[in-house]
Amino acid sequence: MSNRISTFKVAKMDCPSEEQMIRMKLEGVESILQLNFDIPNRKLSVIHSGDVSSFENHIHALNFDANLLSTEEYNAPLTSDNDELERKMLWWVLGINFSFFIIEMLYGWISVSMGLVADSLDMLADSIVYGMSLIAVGSTVIKKKRIAKVSGYFQMLLALIGLVEVIRRFIGMESIPVFQNMIVISILALIANSISLYLIQKVKSEEAHMKASAIFTSNDIVINLGVIVAGGLVYFTNSKYPDLVIGSLIFLIVIRGAFRILKLSK
């Protein structure tokens, strides 16, 4: 029987966390020969032998609003991924994200800024996604799901603690955050994410997986800009509330990411 290629429209696939979920969900399905991701257009192409029904239910189980667009014969040779370059890039991005998780967490507490603390957890969330990709290489599906479960609950716990602290600061008589630290540290994080984005695009600008990583990092840049704006508003209004608002929004983003990671453990 000749190989086939089935293309899915995955409406909720917009960053590497969803790609990683799909990869882990489909791992072990013998009929699948290759997965090709087009994150910008939210499409997944599966090169496989046999019928699409052997894995279609696995994709639907993730609840990413996936719809089968087409299935046709596939006679082209399979392409090979440059795993070593991808692994090297993941280590760089992981190192940058985890370093700024520590830096932003430290300065967030020193500066009484929940925006920085929340941004640090977003960096940690990114680190978890990239770390899962690296640590789980060569592991069994069961071990990968255990890693996802622990990572997801840990990330959610930290974000919930952060939200409780935000609520406490909303109703309490807290000090106004040090806006200078908010702006300076966020600018440094912005530069770090910009470097990550540059490296990803330079090394594998045409690879779907690296394009997805670029989108993920671009989202981080938007969050960094949000904290910078919040720091400016703290200065102009002499109020703690802009910092608490941006912190709340980022914590909710982190919780949303945790729920996605936890889907892997099912």
Image (cartoon, helix red, strand yellow):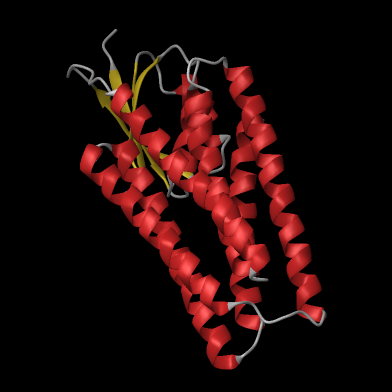
Q: Residue furthest left?
A: 76
Residue 35 location, quadrant: top left
Observer-nearest of 235 and 164: 235
Relative to 240, is 203 above or below?
above
Disc tally is 0
Q: Is residue 50 left or right of residue 4?
A: right
Could you tell me residue 61's position as x and y percent? 58, 34
Q: Is residue 159 positioned above or below 211 on the image?
A: below
Q: Position of residue 82 (x, y in %)?
A: 27, 24
| Place of residue 37 in the rendered image (x, y in percent of width and height, measured from the top left) | 34, 36
Which residue is painted at 53% across and 85% down in the image? 233
Tell which of 206 and 217 is nearer to you. 217
191, 206: nearer the viewer: 191
Q: Is residue 258 above or below residue 68?
A: below
Residue 165 found in image quarter: bottom right
> Residue 192 appears at what percent x and percent y?
39, 54
State the residue at coordinates (34%, 35%). Answer: 89
Picture quarter with the N terminus: top left
The residue at the point 64 percent across, 60 percent down is 251
Q: Quadrant of the C terminus?
A: top right
